Amino acid sequence: MYDLPMLGISDSLKAMQVMLEEALKEPERPVSIAIVDSQGLTIQFARMDQCRLLPQQLAYKKAYTAAVMRSDTLAVAERFKSMGRSISEMGDHNLVGVQGGIAIQRPGDGAFLGAIGVSGLAAEEDEALARLGLQAMQL
């Protein structure tokens, strides 16, 4: 029998609330936030008012990439670059090599639970906001 750990709604709600509270301090800089399970399926998604379409799409794709690659998107991008390859060679249109997606791993056994993706700010700020959400989960 398989025992697959899953990211639950309660943990993702904590993360989403903290990230949105922080992002709403600057409403003129709208972001989108996606939280996905370990297979890249959406658990939660939020976008601030006036957030354009591209950041909405990228937030999901960053979360998806971090989940299915089991690594933060910056590390994924660096890995492909070091091999002289493009992430598009993987043939999955949802994979992106853009900073702002972080993998969620359970402490102790290291089980991958899912990922958070943020888009709308500078890449470093996207990642910092995602990390704030991860901290809020208190895993």
Image: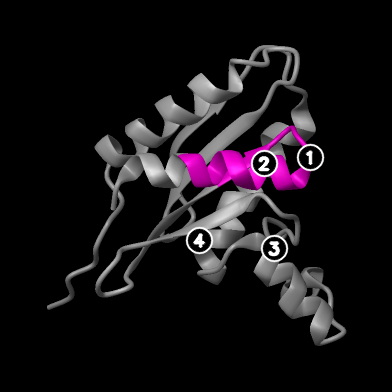
- Magenta-span inclusion, residue 39: no
Q: Which residues are magenta?
A: 117-132
Provide the residue designation for mark 3: 74
121 or 8: nearer the eye? Answer: 121
Residue 37, horizontal then vertical, whole percent: 40, 53
Confirm whether residue 42 shows in the render. no
Discs 1/4, front: 1
Q: CB atoms at circles 1 and 4 under 8 Å apart?
A: no
Q: Residues within 10 Å of mark 2 (few under 14, many from 20)?
A: many
Residue type, label 4: Ala
Q: Quadrant of residue 105?
A: bottom left
Residue 5, horizontal then vertical, whole percent: 24, 62
Q: Quadrant of residue 23?
A: top right
Provide the residue designation for mark 4: 67
Residue 74's place in the image compared with 34, above or below, is: below
Residue type, label 3: Leu
Alpha carbon distance from label 3 to label 4: 13 Å
Q: Residues within 10 Å of mark 3 (few under 14, many from 20)?
A: many
Secondary structure of the residue carrying tag 1 is loop
Q: CB atoms at circles 2 and 1 under 8 Å apart?
A: yes
Secondary structure of the residue carrying tag 4 is helix
Disc tally is 4
Residue type, label 2: Asp
Provide the residue designation for mark 2: 126
Q: Residues within 10 Å of mark 4 (few under 14, many from 20)?
A: many
Residue 138's place in the image compared with 15, above or below, is: below
